[in-house]
């Protein structure tokens, strides 16, 4: 028998550690490949850590509530084969596992409670919940009174936001400082009559508003539009979608086709795939495309398809479907919502013909895709012009005019349109 260390993988550019919130497997339990072993929480999201090998959980190196650093072993899996074989297997898995040299567990780093969150309660709170509570001035005693909807009654960020939204001024918790949505000198006095309904923004809406205002303050936005004929693309999808779902097990939507066109256009115009750091331009090598996804709560999240230019239509469709499903279930991993270099938002989902999206910082451009509608249009042919019913749609591109001028932004948008208009109706997938 051999032994393998299960390593806490990298979960995002800014995530350095995670807290063990629960063990899903006990010592001695059999574990299948990719089966969840433990649940962890970071200051961004909660997630599950899967097993990188099939075997038996020999030892848990940390307890619930302990902090584990990225790259640190947190469990030992006993696998079939000799120790030498297990070592070779581990070496083939990059950044996920490492061979065991000794069975001594790493020193456990305990959570240090801050003064505002000290109490006799042993109730567990994730780093994200504790961080929000501190910012809102909530005591540990107040947290203990909030009913949790998470596993084993654990308080989630949604539970905390719901409490903050519903609490009145008689609560003992200190009221948070208001988020300034615009500079004080540009605020306007709003007068309401006795018949008006006064609605206080919830905290999530305040954070979204602040993010949007900052993006507009940072980047001078310009938006360009093109109307394109996507009849060939629509007819091709209609022709293959049933067989596609039967063979692949998931639906073929228009989103992966949009992502594919954007990835191609970025290769033609790489200076759209950049970020700005002061007066320095960082030209990104990877083409990582974020897809704005609506959540049941009404909020948005942007999972990122990494290296989208390297995926075929099947790979793109699989990731789009998987991300959309797990986003709705709040099961996205921290690394899956970070590292984007370009974003697509589909306002056509809501029946809108076009939009003027706000750039997702620190990116410099964002594409909005409108609804696809049948329209009578003039079709030019060698035999003369005629009017025909075609599938038409609008594309909108908002871009940062500090680094993307009208020629670059307009040409890039037109190139996306060309790829979609010239879609091969006889395209073969398999």
Image: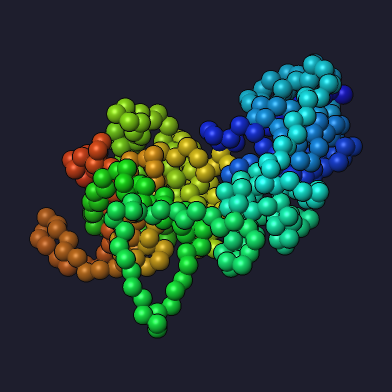
Please tell me whether residue 139 is drawn above or below residue 283 in the rendered image: below
Task: Kindly identify the residue that appears in the image at 46 percent across and 71 percent down.
Answer: 199
Query: Residue 348 at what x, y percent from top left?
Result: 37, 62
Question: How are the residues colored?
Answer: rainbow
- The front one of 139 and 92 is 139
Please tell me whether residue 99 is drawn above or below residue 377 in the rendered image: above
Q: In the figure, is residue 35 to the left or right of 430?
A: right
Question: Residue 146's image quarter?
Answer: bottom right
- The front one of 44 and 187 is 187
Task: Kindly identify the residue that appears in the image at 18 percent across and 40 percent down.
Answer: 407
Q: In the figure, is residue 232 to the left or right of 73?
A: left
Question: Residue 388's image quarter?
Answer: bottom left
- The front one of 348 and 210 is 210
Query: Residue 229 at what x, y percent from top left?
Result: 26, 57
Query: Residue 167 at what x, y percent from top left?
Result: 60, 66
Task: Kindly identify the residue that appears in the image at 32 percent across and 49 percent down.
Answer: 216
- The front one of 116 and 45 is 116
Q: In the figure, is residue 428 to the left or right of 33?
A: left
Query: Residue 122 at what x, y percent from top left?
Result: 81, 48
> Please, which residue is most extreme toward the bottom here?
195
For residue 90, say whether it is visible.
Answer: yes
For residue 244, say whether it is visible.
Answer: no
């Amino acid at each position: 028998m051999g032994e393998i260390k299960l390593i806490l993988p990298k979960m995002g550019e800014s995530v350095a550690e995670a807290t063990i919130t629960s063990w899903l497997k006990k010592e001695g339990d059999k574990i299948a490949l990719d089966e969840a072993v433990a649940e962890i929480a970071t200051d961004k999201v909660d997630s599950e850590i899967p097993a990188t090998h099939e075997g038996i959980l020999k030892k848990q190196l940390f307890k619930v509530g302990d902090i584990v650093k990225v790259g640190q072993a947190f469990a030992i899996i006993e696998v079939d084969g000799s120790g030498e074989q297990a070592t070779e297997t581990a070496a083939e898995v990059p950044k996920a596992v490492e061979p065991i040299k000794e069975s001594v567990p790493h020193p456990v780093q305990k959570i240090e409670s801050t003064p505002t969150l000290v109490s006799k309660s042993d109730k567990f709170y994730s780093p994200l919940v504790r961080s929000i509570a501190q910012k809102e001035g909530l005591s540990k005693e107040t947290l203990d009174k909030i009913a949790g909807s998470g596993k084993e009654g654990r308080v989630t960020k949604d539970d905390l936001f719901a409490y903050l939204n519903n609490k009145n001024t008689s609560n003992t918790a200190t009221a948070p400082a208001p988020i300034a949505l615009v500079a004080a000198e540009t605020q306007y006095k709003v007068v309401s009559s006795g018949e008006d309904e006064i609605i206080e923004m919830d905290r999530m809406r305040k954070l979204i508003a602040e993010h949007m205002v900052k993006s507009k303050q940072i980047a001078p936005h310009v938006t360009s539009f093109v109307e394109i004929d996507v009849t060939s693309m629509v007819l091709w999808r209609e022709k293959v979608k049933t067989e596609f779902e039967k063979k692949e097990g998931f639906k073929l939507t228009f989103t992966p086709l949009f992502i594919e066109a954007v990835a191609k256009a970025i290769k033609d115009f790489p200076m759209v795939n950049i970020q700005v750091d002061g007066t320095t331009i960082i030209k990104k090598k990877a083409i990582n495309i974020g897809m704005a996804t609506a959540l049941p709560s009404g909020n948005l999240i942007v999972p990122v398809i990494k290296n989208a230019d390297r995926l075929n239509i099947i790979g793109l469709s699989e990731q789009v479907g998987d991300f959309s499903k797990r986003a709705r279930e709040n099961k996205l991993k921290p690394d899956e919502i970070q590292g984007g270099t370009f974003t697509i938002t589909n306002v056509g989902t809501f029946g809108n013909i076009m939009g003027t999206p706000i750039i997702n910082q620190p990116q410099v451009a964002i594409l909005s895709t409108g609804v696809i509608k049948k329209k009578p249009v003039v079709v030019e042919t060698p035999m003369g012009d005629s009017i025909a019913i075609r599938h038409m749609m609008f594309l909108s591109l908002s871009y940062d005019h500090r680094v993307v001028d009208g020629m670059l932004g307009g040409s890039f948008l037109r190139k996306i349109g060309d790829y979609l208009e010239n879609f091969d109706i006889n395209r073969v997938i398999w």
